[in-house]
Amino acid sequence: MRTGIANLPLHGGKAPRWLFERMTRLAREITIITVRDFGPEEVLTRLSDPYWFQALGCVLGFDWHSSGVTTTVCGALKEGIRGLEGELGLFVAGGKGRVSRKTPSEIESAGRHLVVEPGELVQASRLSAKVDTSGVQDGYQLYHHAFFFTKDGLWAVVQQGMNEATRYARRYHWLGLGSSPLSESKSFVKDPHSAVCCDKKADVLNMVAKEGDEAREVCTRLSWERPEKLTRELKKLKEVKTLDMPRRHHTTLADIHPERLQKIFLVTYERRPESFKNLIGMEGVGPKTIRALSLISELVYGVKSPVRDPVRFSFAHGGKDGYPYPVDRTTYDESVEFLRNAVSQARVGNTERLKALKRLKGFVKPR
């Protein structure tokens, strides 16, 4: 499931054409070698690791500190394996902005190569995006969504959100291995991530926290209530002038307009979603709907909504001065050795290999 998040400052501009063309060629060779030696599922595993993804951006020659590393690396990988998808058993859908909205059709277009129904992968793509906008309300609006998948139905997501106020971007990593991405054994709504990579914690509404079982259950059952009852409760809350919220969520009571939510409440009342995963996956159910239900749950029924930010510090491999944490030498060395091995075997010209190895040499620090 989701494996990590990385926070990166927003930088303007884009990769120059001469650099992107080289990134594409090198990304193709690294992918080919990785698939040949380890299989396509290993590509997914490594892309879902924010440490390795950041190191890949470095070896491809892109700015290690820029938010653009996400969109550019994913774009180089997608362009690099174009035409080789069937041979590699690895596919890439989506991208930045309007391209991200083509993800479902691009997944379906690969249907003849797949041994699973494309609809399952489309649903996994959609749910991962919904969780990172409505389930975890951290103030970052998604603008990039890349969906990587194999013919066997294994998948990974690398998507990114933007916070214009703080001028930072946050990257979300997901990994779906094993059983069907729609099975209950692979929960989209109970701590789906193993790491959140960030430079600071934020005030969030985290409805997918492990300790949020009761809140999710109450919110789901509240969605079965008549719309007029829910809007009436929300109006009561807005009339309480002395309401003192303990911390700022990115969607607050002041942002909620009960009369505008009545239409979506009618849909949830009629469909009665069986689980929080079904609720959050419904069309039209967004951050304000989930926040409204969590408010009623917490302030009317006494069930507290989880507000734990799943963040932990894991920028690339750490910092030499120990900030935000000391360098993790084992992980550092594993990343370097894997990339060194991949590049040394890649079918690229001597110049490209030399440049890549020089970048790796500068990436290694003596013990």
Image (spheres, grey):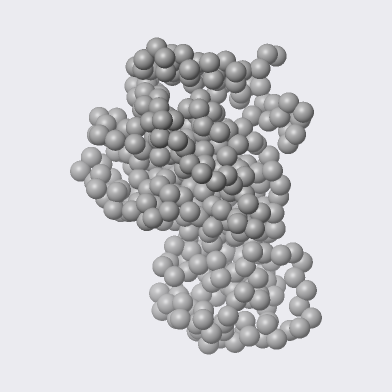
Q: Is residue 251 visible?
A: yes
Residue 43, by quadrant, is: top left
Q: Is residue 252 above or below residue 181?
A: below
- Write the residue at 23% across / 40% down: 113
Query: In the rendered image, is residue 44 in sight?
Result: no
Q: Nearer the viewer, residue 232 or 204?
A: 204
- Image coords of residue 264 (percent x, y): 46, 77
Left or right of 289 in this view: 166: right
Q: Nearer the viewer, residue 1 or 19?
A: 19
Q: Position of residue 134 (x, y in %)?
A: 54, 62
Residue under the point 64% across and 64% down: 250
Residue at image location 52% in from the left, 48% down from the top: 160
Taking the view exactly as shown, the residue that stands out farthest to the left is: 112
Q: Quadrant of residue 42?
A: top left
What is the quadrant of residue 21 in the picture? top left
Q: Is residue 233 left or right of residue 42?
A: right
* 203, 298: nearer the viewer: 203
Q: Give the mark count.
A: 0
**Relative image position of residue 91 (x, y in whole percent):** 32, 39
Q: Is residue 283 above or below residue 296?
A: above
